[in-house]
């Protein structure tokens, strides 16, 4: 009996030692593993087609403003720190914004925050009535924060004085459901997007209030998610009840009437793959 008891005690001691060793091997989080990236949320403008987070701004809502402050959102991978952490980036050569048209104020993850921003001052000008300026950013390693996964390291910011362009996939699909092109009617890209065609949709259908829940109820575009976008509904709402067919027909009638009234200046695309071609509504 004494030998059995001794054997049990030895087994218990061995078990305790083994558990202690396993606990000592548990890896603890190291802040050196923190990283930064752009958002991968399609509701905020991320496109999996080209791994880019799209942002846009229009001075149409405040045409006499000298400038506006815009923040391209950043996401922290890891734990917040008790101090600001600078984020490094480069501006890609494909950017079209003149140097005098913007000023980058700061780029960081603030102390005790899980998100941050590239904060930019965008200047208003007469040229923006007929031009769109673009900045393309690519995140780079910095002393305080390395970069995260490669699919989430690019962002684009565009601004003008025209109707704000859609950046969320579900709004882009609505545009493609209404404007004729060789792309699918629910294509997710902006290959055939033009600001003239969007303005035509807005004028024809009276769409400038999709950010208002009092008008559109649960179908409205809420702030943050879907960016409170005013000019287009989400494609799935007009797809489910087939109302997109009626909207396309109404748009077609509008374009026909406009072109008859303006034979010397019919509606044409001012950008995208269809630049210079007539704006046409899809037929269903």
Image (spheres, rainbow, N blue to C red):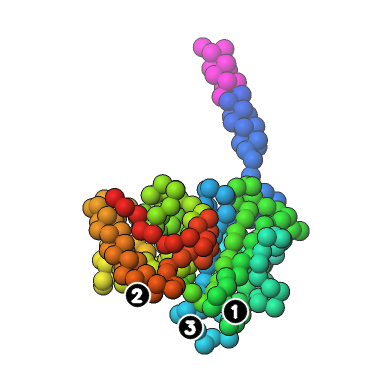
**Is residue 182 highlighted in magenta?**
no
Element at label 2? helix
State the separation of the CA atoms marked 3 and 1: 15 Å
Residue appearing at x 60%, y 70% in the figure = 133
Q: Earlier in the sequence, mark 2 or mark 3?
A: 3
Q: Which mark is residue 261?
A: 2
Element at label 1? helix
Q: Which mark is residue 194?
A: none
Number of other residues with Cα within 10 Å of mark 1, as a class: few under 14, some 14 to 19, many 20 or more? few
Whether residues under marks 2 and 1 lie with C-beta atoms below 8 angstroms apart, the answer is no
Residue 43, image x and y in percent?
44, 57
**Quarter-of-image position of residue 231:** bottom left
Question: Which residue range is magenta in the image?
Answer: 1-12
Residue 126's place in the image compared with 25, above or below, is below
Residue 115, image x and y in percent?
57, 62
Which residue has dot 3 on it?
62
Residue appearing at x 57%, y 49% in the figure = 50
**Quarter-of-image position of residue 237:** bottom left
Q: Which mark is residue 127?
A: 1
Q: In the rendered image, is residue 220 in sight?
A: no
Q: In the rendered image, is residue 163 in sight?
A: yes
Q: Main secondary structure of the magenta part?
A: helix
Tell me if 94 is positioned left or right of 214 in this view: right
Q: Earlier in the sequence, mark 3 or mark 1?
A: 3
Query: Closest to the observer: 79 or 217?
Result: 217
């Amino acid at each position: 009996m004494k030998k059995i008891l001794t054997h049990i005690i030895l087994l218990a001691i061995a078990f305790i030692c083994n558990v202690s060793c396993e606990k000592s091997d548990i890896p603890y989080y190291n802040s050196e593993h923190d990283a930064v990236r752009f958002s991968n949320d399609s509701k905020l403008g991320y496109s999996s087609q080209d791994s880019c987070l799209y942002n846009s701004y229009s001075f149409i809502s405040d045409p006499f403003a000298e400038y506006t402050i815009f923040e391209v959102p950043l996401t922290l991978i890891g734990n917040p720190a008790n101090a600001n952490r600078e984020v490094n980036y480069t501006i890609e050569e494909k950017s079209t914004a003149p140097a005098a048209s913007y000023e980058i104020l700061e780029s960081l993850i603030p102390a005790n925050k899980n998100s941050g921003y590239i904060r930019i001052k965008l200047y208003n000008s007469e040229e923006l009535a007929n031009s769109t300026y673009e900045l393309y950013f690519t995140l780079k390693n910095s002393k305080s924060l390395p970069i995260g996964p490669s699919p989430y390291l690019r962002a684009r910011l565009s601004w003008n004085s025209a109707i704000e362009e859609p950046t969320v996939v579900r709004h882009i699909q609505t545009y493609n459901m209404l404007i004729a092109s060789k792309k699918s009617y629910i294509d997710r890209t902006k290959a055939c997007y033009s600001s003239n065609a969007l303005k035509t949709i807005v004028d024809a259908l009276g769409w400038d209030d999709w950010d208002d829940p009092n008008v559109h109820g649960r179908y409205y575009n809420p702030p943050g998610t879907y960016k409170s976008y005013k000019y287009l509904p989400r494609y799935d709402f007009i797809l489910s009840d087939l109302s997109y067919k009626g909207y396309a027909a109404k748009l077609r009638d509008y374009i026909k009437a406009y072109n008859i009234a303006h034979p010397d200046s019919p509606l044409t695309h001012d950008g995208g793959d269809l630049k210079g071609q007539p704006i046409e509504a899809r037929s269903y």
